[in-house]
Amino acid sequence: MSTRNLGRLLPILDWFPAYSRPAFASDAMAGLIVAIMLVPQGMAYALLAGLPPEVGLYASIVPLVFYGLLGSSRALAVGPVAIVSLMVASTLGEIAETGSAGYLAGAVLLAFLSGAILLGMGLARLGFLVNFLSHPVISGFSSAAALVIGFSQLKHLIGFDIPRSHLITEIIAHAAIHIDHINLATFMIALASFAILLSFRSLISPVLRSIGIGAATSDAIAKAGPLVAVLVTTIVVWQFALDQHSSVRIVADIPAGLPPLTIPNFDLALIEKLLPAAVLIALVGFLESVSVAKSLASKRRQKIDANQELIALGAANIGASVTGGYPVTGGFSRSLVNFTAGAVTPMASIITAGLIGLTVVLLTPLLYFLPKATLAAIIIIAVANLIDLKTLRHAWVYNKADAASLIVTFLAVLTLGIEMGIVFGAALSIALYLWRTSRPHMAEVGRVGQTEHFRNVLRHEVQTDPRVLMVRVDESLYFANTAFLEGQLLTRVADRPEIDHLVLIMSAVNFIDASAIETLETLAERLHDAGVTLHFAEVKGPVMDRLERIEFEKALGEGEVFLSSHEAMRELSKTSVSEAA
Amino acid sequence: MSTRNLGRLLPILDWFPAYSRPAFASDAMAGLIVAIMLVPQGMAYALLAGLPPEVGLYASIVPLVFYGLLGSSRALAVGPVAIVSLMVASTLGEIAETGSAGYLAGAVLLAFLSGAILLGMGLARLGFLVNFLSHPVISGFSSAAALVIGFSQLKHLIGFDIPRSHLITEIIAHAAIHIDHINLATFMIALASFAILLSFRSLISPVLRSIGIGAATSDAIAKAGPLVAVLVTTIVVWQFALDQHSSVRIVADIPAGLPPLTIPNFDLALIEKLLPAAVLIALVGFLESVSVAKSLASKRRQKIDANQELIALGAANIGASVTGGYPVTGGFSRSLVNFTAGAVTPMASIITAGLIGLTVVLLTPLLYFLPKATLAAIIIIAVANLIDLKTLRHAWVYNKADAASLIVTFLAVLTLGIEMGIVFGAALSIALYLWRTSRPHMAEVGRVGQTEHFRNVLRHEVQTDPRVLMVRVDESLYFANTAFLEGQLLTRVADRPEIDHLVLIMSAVNFIDASAIETLETLAERLHDAGVTLHFAEVKGPVMDRLERIEFEKALGEGEVFLSSHEAMRELSKTSVSEAA
């Protein structure tokens, strides 16, 4: 195997040999900043997934190392992310009680299954499959998922339990009815966390810059918002013993030490139950990851290999499943932080993993008094970015069908749940595409002045011959649109008895499938019976090659295939005139 | 409501006012011939559906009248058909024992549900949906269904039970292992029936003509094959008491009298179970019916209104459900007989219905000794026509993807069963279409000689400018192919550093969806960063209109939209040269 091929399979071979001290310094800084961000985020997302907080930390160690060795992106930061965590929660909520051993085992198995699916797809080179989710569907899905995630955290902000539901209205109704159960201390901690997070996000960096601190340092400090919120609220709870006096819920004991080795439970019945969700988790995770990896790579003219990404994310998830973790993927905001903080190679991720490893070994006692309300606030601020109105506005102006698929996906996620919602959205965007191509645009054309150009008679002033109907079909011909085409053409011919010739201009026809061929043959016959000859013009090379294979001209009878519309008009006008004479 | 609109809803108003004696004579002859054909066929198909023979006769009375009043086809002969009967058997086989009251009630409910679905689709004008089944899928489905139907009758030919299975191999294996159980008398009757049916089909008509009998009369007599087979074998069984001495299975008691009034059992759980099958039965039935109606109508320049057909078939099925019948549709061979026998209006069907009504009232005792083996032979000869190798040969030569979808549908029906098979086939043909459009053909083009024509550089000898890359994209741009397009274009540009301008020729691009717009905007940015300007040429009117709505030219920056490839080449070559100078 050549070095180049080996480098594609193990991208670390591409960068490690030339690895330098400055690169390491840059990677180390980025790795540290991401680790500071990831400790609270990892715990928060685990909470969102219904898992103990340490699971989020375990999922932030080995998976990062595996991705670092195999991934084709230099700046992707892998780990727990919000949408995948929500999908895990909604899947496992149906098979086990939150907090039970079965729930935890389910998470490990989900990580293994989605890892295996990603790996399999990568080896089968199925990376293209993700293209079948359109941008509007992804946008509608993300916005709705952000709302579902946000409202799932409401119980942590107000400090009393709300039955799990994917219906936001039910959550709000329950919260509103029992609002007298609110835990005020918890609610105040949540408000304080929001204040800290929001001020770090939009105020700190400009203030620091205005007092003369460098832009890079200011931005780096601004990323520490979650850490500061965690520190401040943890200290407050500890100092005032709010967990005991005011029943503020805290993270409490996190087992110290490295992640345990876990073996997924290969129970066939359980696998069968989890498999559909694992497929969706794998696809959605891959989609999020590859979008962010692509956008970061293009900023530095690097390339992302979608199939290699599948393999790397597959390995990362299998890594998560054997070290007590749960499904992971490349996260959007964290990768952006990694990139802007200066990560130049996957070494940054490996450093992050090392620091998280140190945290679980040494620092977990410090997190004992961390209130869950703070983690909930961190989640809500993180997912607020996912709510995307710009794509909707854009699609609304450009193409209502795209806007409709966005809105329908959004509503489907909110009403049918997150898995059914995305399946529904994907099916809808494919259906809309098929619907559009099943009713192709057809234009009757005529000659522009004395030129050889032929244009739509409705848009341009053109010359036509009443005995020659020239129609341009603006779509490839395939099974779903041939009946429509046939009906339209027969109606036009039936409406104008003076027509002797029908010329189909095929400049926009890129393909004709077997069903369409059959229809064209029948059409030629029916037109012939009605005294009209069917001709073709401007047939493309690849299309003509296929037509010749089946001796299509025989089916045309007296009909011809003209090179250009001009030639067709010249020849047929002549004949018509002489016939009429 | 105008008379014309009323005539569309009740097509009988179109033809009845002008109905004449000669038309009646012609219709009466056709009605008689179809009735002679329908009595044995109706019983045989009921047998195939696992129902008592009289159910097939009941389904041949009221449904025909309802279709006659509402249908837009003048020659369609509605009634039990083979494929629908098989689908009924495979659906009901899972919910009840053959011959039980539940089985019969299920058949009535299936007729009602598919009737309601057809009616609903007609009112919602969803007739176009049927276009999404491609010809190769239909061909593969029909051929496989014919085999499944044929082998399901094997037990009647050899006279011993074979456990129901949709796997032909299992049926053959069971028959082979227990071949010593064969009932020789039954088998001889089957062979005799085949001999009679085949000789009527291909020998009788030429022989009659050669002795001077008119062509029309000869052909009409040839259609009586099934009736003759029924008469001969019934008399033989009766004369030699083969039902008692040799255990030949016979139709036995058929209740005399008009069809009973039945009320479908609206049990919600049962409806939920039968609904998916009812949808498929409705779609497949509609497909068969509308194809034959269309092909007959075009022979006489009449028109079929797909949505009116849905309404008429819906009413026919609901009619079947309240008169002890089971799902019906327009049958292929029977309609062809009706048409060639001279049916000019739906009065022919109404006459057929009247004759079948007389049969159930008066003639059922004559059918007591009719052997089931004869009915099985009638089914097998009828479905043999469905096996279609021509479409496969044609598709194989023309387009391997179409041939593949035919073969896969064929195999899916044989292995997964008839319902899953057709769903699988339909999904596959859509997937193949999406796959093809997701990897569009792109051609680098150059100028042909000194003309204004631009053609593929690989197919023609053309002039190009190394600094200007002109690429024609042969597909509409939508979510599934934008990533491919972007990757291809970036690779081409990366491979040739001398390129300053990239011109996308959009003559074959009929639509750009919102996802593709986003990709084009990103592409323009990335190319700009790489020192390449993105231009467009030959953008179609409707596409340009949409681009203008979102001020797309802003995203293009210095890029332009040229009217023609020629203009683009002229302008850009100039710039490049002057820049280079």
Image: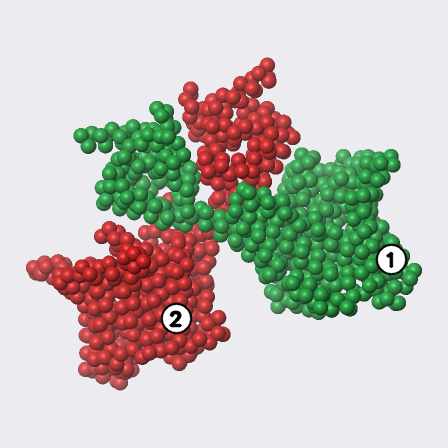
Chain colours: A green, B red
Q: How far from the left and from the top, in percent, is residue A39?
A: 80, 53
Q: Secondary structure at mark 2?
A: helix
* Residue drawn at 63 percent across, 27 percent down: B531
Q: Residue A234 got which mark?
A: 1
- Amino acid carrying mark 2 in the image: Phe
Q: How far from the left and from the top, in percent, is residue A507?
A: 40, 35
- Amino acid carrying mark 1 in the image: Thr
Q: How far from the left and from the top, in percent, is residue B487?
A: 58, 38
Q: How far from the left and from the top, in percent, is residue B341?
A: 18, 61
Image-quadrant location for residue A107: bottom right
- Horizontally, residue B425 falls left or right of residue A381, namely left
Q: Is residue B242 above or below residue A580?
A: below
- The residue closer to the viewer here, A42 or A578, is A578
**Residue position for label 2:** B112
Residue A79 in sight here: no
Q: Residue furthest right?
A: A239
Q: Is residue B546 above or below residue B169?
A: above
Q: Residue B94 got which mark?
A: none
Q: Secondary structure at mark 1?
A: helix
